[in-house]
Image: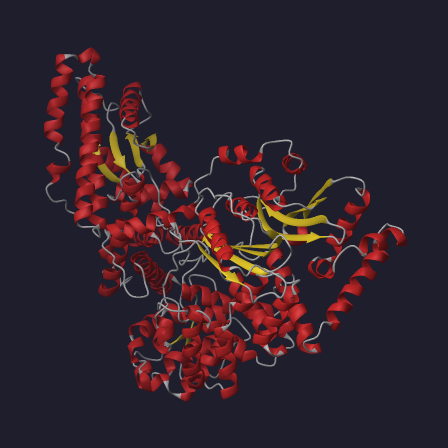
Amino acid sequence: MQKIENQRAIIDRKSIFEALQLIHEENSANSRAQILSLLQQSLENGRKEIAHRLMNAPSAGHAAAAQQAFLVDQLVRIIYDHVTQNLYPVANPSAAERIALVAVGGYGRGEMAPHSDVDIAFITPIKRNAWAEQVAEAILYWLWDLGLKVGQSNRSLDETVRMAKEDLTIRTALLESRFIWGDRDIYAEARNRFWAEVVGKTAPQFIADKMAEREARHQRMGDSRYVVEPNVKDGKGGLRDLHTLYWIGKYVHRVRVARELVDFGLFTKAEHKKFWNAENFLWAVRCHLHQITGRAEDRLTFDLQREIAERMNFADREGQSAVERFMQFYFLNAKIVGDLTGLFIAHLDNNMAQKGRRFLPTIMRRPRKLNGFRLDRGRLALPNQDFFKEDPVRLIEIFQLADKFELEIHPEAMRTARRQAKLIKKITRLDPRANELFLNILCSERDPETVLRWMNEATIFGRFIPDFGKVVAQMQFDMYHHYTVDEHSIRAIGLLAQIEQGKLKKDHPLAASIMKQISSRRVLYVATFMHDIAKGRGGDHSVLGAEIAEILCPRLGLSDAETEMVAWLVRHHLLMSATAFKRDLSDFKTILDFCQIVKSPERLRLLLVLTVVDIRAVGPAVWNSWKRQLLTDLYDAAEEVLRLGHKQRGRDERVKTKKANIQENISLSKSAYNNIARKLPDPYWIAEPEDIIERNILLLHENKDTELALDICYYPERGATLVSIMAADHPGLFYRMAGAIHLSGGNIIDARIHTTKDGVALDNFLIQDPLGRPFQEEAQIAKLKQTIGDALANRSKLAPKLEAKPLVRMRADAFKISPSVFIDNQASNRFTVLEVNSRDRPALLSNLAHALFKSKIMLHSAHIATYGERAVDTFYVTDLFGAKIDNKNKLKSIEEALLKAALGENVPDVGIAA
């Protein structure tokens, strides 16, 4: 354990035990409550002292972890002495009446966070007797009463050895065992038997099992070091990865502390220093997590990141907040953990494998032309340590060869590349051969994602492209982006390659088919690489990124035309998603305005694919069928305009085609169908897919004599529930609908609001639950139908129910977003467009709809988009007479009403528009 300064300030075992003895002697029969109070106060005081020390030295993780283990040690010793001397004393103990208290697991290593489990093994020389069981039970009850979470085992020496042989978890725990108190000879015998009888010659199997265990844990945790809410203990690049290296080193070489790994050649001194620094930082973060939450919390969530960044003295810098700088440092340490793991495994491979073979399995390839590089058991290696110094371009070439021949790179070569990355200077960056090699990697038809990630881990990527180096490990402090900027960009390139290879055809059929038509293939790969390269610079990253592209593309060897195209794609990489998700695609001016920017079919194809991989690379579950359909609708409409010219001739043809297709499939007579079809305006036919139109027409036909009808069904094509309503059109209809859906526990993700030519409202909503899942159980749909029906028919008071419904605390509460309202009278020829940006929360849309209702304006369509904690709701509105709203006072009052609603404040009634 690390040396602990001023131990008695944390806990003074001798004085506490003397006080305990005094309490026991004065009232031995009823002393438990007083003794427990004494121990509780000692634990609390010790924790306060440790917390105080950590606040004064907020990065001293090793010290805080060691102090916590010391505190628990002393309490366990006090309790053991009380139990064996006062409660169950044995005047003349037999050979069987002996017991050793042994710390195992992390506690055995002498490292604990404030609320870590206390893992103790009670070991007896032979089968447990009554005295040993009484002692162990009494100690456990004292520890439990102190509020400690205890993991315990009570075994004889023989049982301990047998169980360790059978169970990997027990074996790992005992590997880190440490004597706490009791009979030291029993502990010594247990240790000797463990090494002689359990470890023996089982090191290869232990290593294989621990690596498999590590891989399974990574899969559970998201298999990336760069998730934006990482698990400090069990996540990839976290403490458990470092512990795994230590366990393996200890098992193979019996090292006592991590620094001894250097003596066996598993680390250099510099690498051990990195190990120590990374572990120290991660322990500091974990201890802060436990202290802030008051529990064993190891996930670094958004609401905790800001507070820990402040505790650890990170400050704001231009373009980066304190929390973003803290998380960038966290990810750099997680990256170091990954680098050390690779080197450690390589050393094991070399030391333990048979001659000419690999200790860990791999695919062996033997390419002939390696330009001076050599193969070492199937891995790309260096002929000598000066190979990169002789020609720094080789620092790029090694990765290009790895990609070309699908080879692994020897960890020693990776270590040398990382150490000599500084050889890449301006002359290398401007070398045409180096840039050609890099472009070959970036645009590879094989697996560019893997090789680019290797380059990034070796720091070569950021050295060769300094602008990319600035976003390495850069976090975006929001709930939308799941990965750091560099990881997001590399994942996007990987997705692009998979789409091109046809591996994601089912998820992205349009993008997969378009890839075959694209003539500017390398433009697309370079644009995907650069689309977020200017994040964190304090300005519009799209504009700044386009400026970087104009400089960087010629260096990479792209022509002027290719450079212009890449810069345009980077500048407009958010255009297609913003248009599809936040604008009314049935409004023809939306399509025309979009096409006015895009201008050519090739740009449209490139932009579609870039948009798809950008969204998909944000994180798991961000892409869904609803987004796919909206992007497809926009692409189809824009492609038609760009192909036919700026005319609505193609639009008319689409309406006629839809009408004919539906008439052919619907189970209605021609006259009944035509009677309803002629009442539906052209925007309706453009906006809705054929299957929804068919359901709507049947709803109208079957309820022609009623004033209100609902149709609710699971809609798998969009991953949502479709709610269709037919009602007499009146102000407040949307507000009542949104409020009823909120009361039912649903969120509206899209809304299409229509009015037939004879004044009937026909609205279609797509809804999901708060976790993004559709309502599809019969009971769910029945409840939804009942709640909506009651609200629309005025059978229940909606406003009081909405006020009474509690708002659950959301993760989005960790973010401060000032709401804003944008009013656009140019985006549509017929409507005023209102866009509200605010923090997402329950009942937001219901509140906004209520504000529109009180503002006495007509809502014609609504488009709902969420980006993590941020909601963007767009409304197409007119005044009560169906005209655009251009009165400045009226627009100002609407803006104020929406801002109040976004903040959850009451909205006053607004007078009739002038």
Image height of 662 relative to 841, above or below:
below
Q: Relative to residue 523, is residue 313 drawn left or right? A: left
Image quadrant where one finds the N terminus = top left
Image quadrant where one finds the C terminus = bottom right
The x, y position of residue 107, in whole percent, is: 27, 40
Q: How is the image coloured?
A: secondary structure
Image height of 582 relative to 194, above or below:
below
Task: Please state which of residues 697 and 911 is positioned toward the viewer in this rendering.
Answer: 911
The x, y position of residue 280, in whole percent, is: 24, 53
State the residue lying farthest toward the front. Answer: 914
Task: Please state which of residues 634 and 384 is positioned toward the viewer in this rendering.
Answer: 634
The x, y position of residue 497, in whole percent, is: 55, 70
On the question of residue 356 being in view, the answer is: no
Residue at the (24%, 23%) spot, across then down: 97
Q: Relative to residue 488, is residue 90 drawn left or right? A: left
Image height of 107 relative to 593, above or below:
above
The x, y position of residue 281, in whole percent, is: 26, 54
Task: Please state which of residues 452 and 84 is positioned toward the viewer in this rendering.
Answer: 452
Rendered image quadrant of residue 794: top right
On the question of residue 818 being in view, the answer is: yes
How many badges with numbers are in the image? 0
